[in-house]
Image (spheres, grey):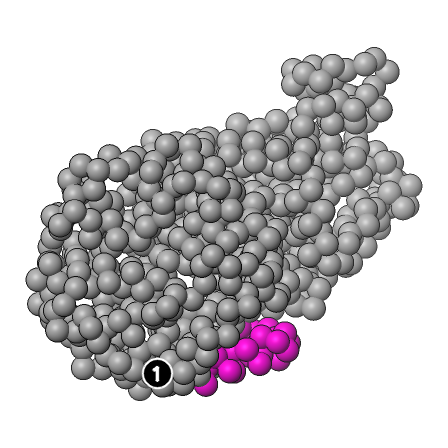
Amino acid sequence: MHIEPSFHKRYKKALNDKTMLKAVKLGTGRLRGNRTKAIEAVGVEKWLEFRDRAEAIRMHVVQHLDQYLEQMVDSVLKRGGHVCLAKTGEEAVQYIADLAKKKNAKNIVKSKSMVTEEIHLNPALEQQGCKVIESDLGEWIIQLAGETPSHIIVPAMHKNRFQVADLFNEVSKDKIPAEVQALCGFARAHLREQFLKIDMGITGCNFALADSGAFTLCTNEGNARIVSALSPTLVTVMGMERILPGVEELAVMLSLLARSATGQKLTVYNTLSTGVRSEDEYDGPQEFHLVIVDNGRSKLLGSKYEKVLNCIRCGACLNACPVFRNIGGHAYGWVYPGPIGAVLSPLYQGMDKYGELAYATTLCGACASTCPVKIPLHDMLYALRNDKVELEHKGELAEDIAYKGWSATFASASRYRFSVRMARRFQFPLVSAGKIAYGPPPISNWLKARDMPALPDKFFHEIWPDMKDGKE
Amino acid sequence: MKASLFITCIADLMYADVGKSVVNVLRRSGVQLDFPEGQTCCGQPAFSSGYYKETAVVAKKIIEVFEKSERVVMPSGSCAAMIHHGYPILFKDDPVWAKKADDFVHKCYEFSQFIVDVLGITDVGATFKKKVTYHSSCHMSRILGVEEQPKILLKNVKGIEFIELPFAFDCCGFGGTFSMKMSGISEAIVEEKVDNIIETGADVLAGSDLTCLMNISGRLSRRGSRIKVMHLAQVLDQGV
């Protein structure tokens, strides 16, 4: 899928895609409404307590990540699994591709995993002749469409049922009507066939438990459980920060994850798997590989952005974000959209490529106040802008000049008063009926859809002397 | 009680009438107001754009201007939030100014916060026979944590019919330079806000942040709506 390099062009295209926007507004509206109800059911105060606990757990893990990773690796090896610690996405892809070759795996079935989207795993496997099937319904839909996910937990949020029916009818012999039940029924039957042919399975990982070496999969469709149970060779791919100490912490995170993501008390299927089947077990893989991906994460440790590693990929900040709701996920350009993506993309992929995303926000703070693990996304968006200007010296020239001028003028009341009086005196060519009618950019951008009042005859500081002594 | 008025640049330059109402309401509530002449702007525009050094120059000036004030009141939630949340970030590596900023933060109040929390007044004695709805500005509610105070004051205005605005806490789409840099997205967001406002059937939209109100009223007026947009202080200054 070709991705347009300019964010401005991407979002302008999105603003014109009314079908997509309708689907996104419906989807985000439902999810955030459900989340609100779930929090009301728990009680706001208790919810805030839960958030504090979750934040403390995640911060503790992130700050001791080296220890927990070591423990995790030991636990997996002890249970007979294999571990790959991949510094880059390419290393992870290479390891999995080599494994598929070694196992002569033709049919690979995956369950939902954002990190495999991040490292572009599927194209690499397909290139060497593997058939890769996504078994999460949303992921399968976008796989058929040749697209990337537009939302972290609802990857096909941007599509309506008619578009899904068109996609399904390309692979179905019989015509499937655009009705939810019929579409799900078809997907279920079709995917079941794929599960039975599975040579190698690949799953994501919601949480890995360091003390037992177990990994958790949370799905509402049960597909990840099937993949983890039926695959002779199973590969689980996780971002290196996706660790918890043990089940006690998992209990807190699971209840926050489901409520934040969809408003459910719990996700329908919560699978805890320890990888290789033991002698007294009847199912589970004969061979298990855990691939732990760094891909830019470790450089955030100890930095002012460290807390972004708290993220549990619930997607709540996307639903809360007015910008996401009005442009959808693809406009963000990389795998993680919304506020979390606006922070992660420039940090992982570089300011040059994704720096514009730090400006794709009204700075309303809805993201930070929604985040279940209290990532200060709002502050980080400011910090990214500040880095661009002061660390990288890549501010726009016009802004550099404007703010230097602003600073010099506004640091002195007399210069401030002089300059605003000048502005008032010379605004007349732009004014009509008390409103600014025309203006150069950037004012012209404002005026496209909104009026702007002209500067008034008297500023407040000119009126004050008459009000000073208690006169009204 | 003595307090200093920080009018904030947007009210000073664009909405002097709001300033008059702020003065009237506070005086009627027994406040002895002064207006330190050296004041300009809290620094929010530069801070939001990442220009911290330039912001710090202006912020220091503001801190100095109000050095002798016991309390500082401002008719803007986002300026108060800028001072409370932004100033500590600006001076985190400068112990001398961090201390001065901290002292300043502790005496700064948003208008409705000052009336309800400091003066302990919930009814300012206004009368306004209109249907009024209220937009909760983002920085005032989420960063400053002031949510209920303006609504308490509005609900106690005689004759008022207060209507809750659906999705009142959703952003209006202003976002400072965002509204001009990414005006297409900003327009889509303000359109949702305006749809929600119109749906209430209110005669008046009240708010506590003039930049949000400029954005919303700019769109309402472009759409030809007759809904009047007023700062909370203007509503509280009616019928006395």
Q: Is residue A396 magenta?
A: yes
Q: Main secondary structure of the magenta part?
A: helix
Q: Write down the region rendered in magenta.
A: A386-408
Q: Is residue A108 left or right of residue A240?
A: right
Give how far across and how far down residue B201 sits, in percent.
37, 32
Which residue: 30% across, 70% down?
A460
Q: Is A201 on the left-hand or right-hand side of B79? A: right
Q: Disc 1 residue type?
A: Ala
Q: Position of residue A382 (x, y in %)?
A: 50, 66
Indicate the quadrant where residue A328 lies: top right
Judge from the rendering whether residue A12 lies leftward or rightward of residue B76; answer left or right: right
Residue beneath the point at 28% across and 36% down = B131
Percent x, y of residue B71: 18, 71
Q: Chain of mark 1?
A: A
At x 38%, y 41%, the residue is: B227
Of A37 and A15, nearer the camera is A15
Residue A11 in the image, given as x and y percentages of width and height: 67, 50
Looking at the image, residue B197 lies above or below residue A220: below
Q: Which residue is mark 1?
A: A413
* Quadrant the N terminus of chain B occupies: bottom left
Task: Looking at the picture, tell me which residue is in the foreground, A55 or B234.
Answer: B234
Q: Residues within 10 Å of mark 1 (few under 14, many from 20)?
A: some
